[in-house]
Structure formats: structure tokens, C-alpha cells
Image: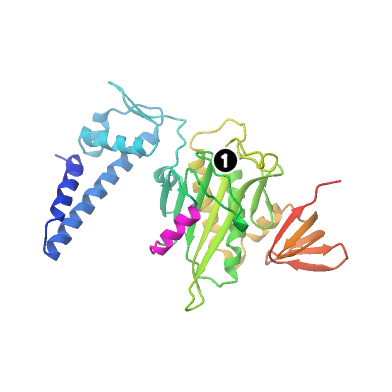
Amino acid sequence: MPYFAYSDRKINELKRFRQVELSPFNTYLVDNRISVCYTLCMSIKEDIYRALDSERGKHFSGEELAQKFGVSRNAVWKAVKALKREGLVIEAGTNRGYVLQPGNDLLTPNGIKKNLNFDCSILVERSVGSTNDEAKKMAADFAPEWSVVFAEEQTAGRGRYSRPFYSPQGAGLYLSILLRPKFTAGDTLFITTSAAVAVCEAIESVSGKKCAIKWVNDVFMGGKKVCGILTEASFDVENGKLSYAIVGIGINVRDSAFPQELKGIATSVFGMDRYPSDTRAKLAAKLLERFRYYYERIPQRAFYEEYKRRSFVIGKEVDVYSGDKSGEGTVLDLEKDCSLRIRYKDGKESLLVAGEVSVKPKK
């Protein structure tokens, strides 16, 4: 009998046995056996997901899947049950087998990884307060760089200055990326700008629609905000170096009922358009790929030309907010360090390194 066929029962038996007083060596053997069982359970679940996902809408019999992966039909049933618990819409019909519905858009690690050109650790949660907070926990547990957490919903998503970010279930792409930068502290300032360019390119790739960037970290479509980016970092107080950085990204992917205060200023990638299946997984993979490209080339400022090309504040009259100061002026240019050169109403020019600008409406 295939090992997986009785792995659930075997795990429970081993756990009960684990409670008996054992020598350190026997404890190690039992723990290792439990780990192997869990690995086999996870492996067959992923294999079956890939098979169903490869031909969505096609029925696969339990016997067919069992023979394909060398397991029992009961093992197949358990794996399908586990996938359905994750939220995948898998139907089972008598004498027809299992089928993954074509329109299923639930995010899963495998669904993202199949479109990804590099390997990384991906976690998908149904609901969290904030993906940035979840990524901080991962950092504290010494998770490696490029550990990524996604959520179908955020109940306490936030942007700059702790402003809330609306994150309804299944309507967006909400993720946080754990980074452990090795470049200089000055270069870490360009993580957010690199992410903004990556978001634009990813959205344009899956939708064919053009994006623009509002300095410094918001992505717009059609004059409305479609994505926000929040980068947070932790420094080692002993050596003064960066311990880690976390890039939180929230994209409004498909139409949702925005709260009254967001109507008129927020939009979605697809709005009321027909929504292609599996789009969020493809968008997630493309975003990770493009961000990794620009992140690894931050010292060369590879993002700069694309960032500047998409900036819609250059040449515009803006209200400027920096700390407790405010003013009015015209954005003349975006410098290589991503500061804005602004000519104020009194004719003086200066660089805006931190703060916000708001484009003044046309009169």
C-alpha cells in the first residue's frame, strides 16, 4: 500500500507514541518520521492541484489520479478534500471524477508559482489584519529573503501615515515581501520606487491598460488610485545596519463596492470589464518577477527611467506637504535620487525629499 494512503493515521499514531518518554535518539527518529509523513501529504496535494489546474474544466477520475501519482484512491480523496478546504472550487460527480472550475480565482501558492520564473517561499492566508504585520512575524522567525505572504482579505490594511487601505475579500492583490538588503542604507530608499515601477509593468502586462505613478508610492489608472505601497524597515541597534525591509503592496484588481469616501478617487484594474480567470495569480507572479529585477539593480538605478516616464506630477501645479510645512508650486523635474525639484509661488526652487504632493485640479 502506498505510504500516503495511511499517512494521516500514521501521523496520529506517531504523535501518540511521541508522548511516551523516549530516548533523545528515538525522539529524533519519531519526529523525522512525522516530518516525512507531512511532506508526503503536502506533495500529493500539490501534485493533484497541478493536474487539475493544467486542464481546468476537464474531469479526472479518482482512479486516473491514483495511478498517475502512485497512491490510493482514498489518498486522492483526502488531497481533494484538503484543497477544497483551502477554498478551491472542485466539483466531484459520480462516474465523472474531479474537475477544477475554469473561473476559479482563489490564490494558492501553486497557482502563483506555476507562473513564476524563480523559486521563493509563498504563504497565502484567507484573512489577516495586515500582511506587513504577518511578514514582520516571519522576519522575527528568521525567514529568508523573498518570503512572501498574500491574503485574500485584510481587516486592518494600512498605507503611509497609518491611513487605512480598503482590502475586501477576493477583490484585490494584497501581499508583503520580506527583504534582507545587502546594499547601502541610502540605496534602500529606492525599494519603494522600484516596487512602483514593477506594479505598473505587472498591471500593464495582464490588462493592457496604462499606469502612472504619483510621487512617491501610489499607482494610478485613469486618474484614480489603483495601488498603494508601504515599505517598512527594521534596523539593528547594535550595528546600525538594516535587519530587514518589508514591502507591502495592495492592488485593487476587480470591481468592488468602494466605501463612499473612496468613490471618485479609487479604481480597479478591471472595473466592470470581463474578468479573466486566474488573473490575480498571473498578476502576482509578474509583479514578483519585475520587482526582483529592479530590486537587484537598485545600485544601478535601473528603475529610474521607467519611474520618471510614468510620473504624472512633472509639470503639474501641486500642493506640497512636508512635515508641518505646506506650500504651492510647480514640479519641474524628478531628480536621479527621486526627489522632486519644485518651483514655489515665490519663485524659489528647492528639492522635496520627503513628504507628499497633491496635484491641483485644473481651473
Identify the residue at image location x=52%, y=45%.
Answer: 173
Could you say where residue 22 lies in the image, as x and y percent from the top left?
11, 61
Callout 1 crowding tier (Cα within 10 Å): few <14, some 14–19, many ≥20? many
The part of the image, by quadrant, that contains residue 96 is top left
Res. 253 in view: yes
Extent of the magenta region = 131-143
Whether 54 is drawn above or below 352: the answer is above
Could you say where residue 83 lies in the image, as x and y percent from the top left?
34, 38
Is residue 135 within the magenta segment?
yes
Q: Is residue 154 left or right of residue 39?
A: right
Viewer-proximal residue among 138 and 286: 138
Q: Is residue 357 left or right of residue 137?
A: right
Q: Amino acid at mark 1?
A: Val
Quadrant containing the N terminus in the rendered view: top left
What residue is disc 1 on?
253
Whether 15 is drawn above or below 337: the answer is above
Q: Is residue 235 left or right of residue 255?
A: left
Identify the residue at image location x=50%, y=34%.
Answer: 277
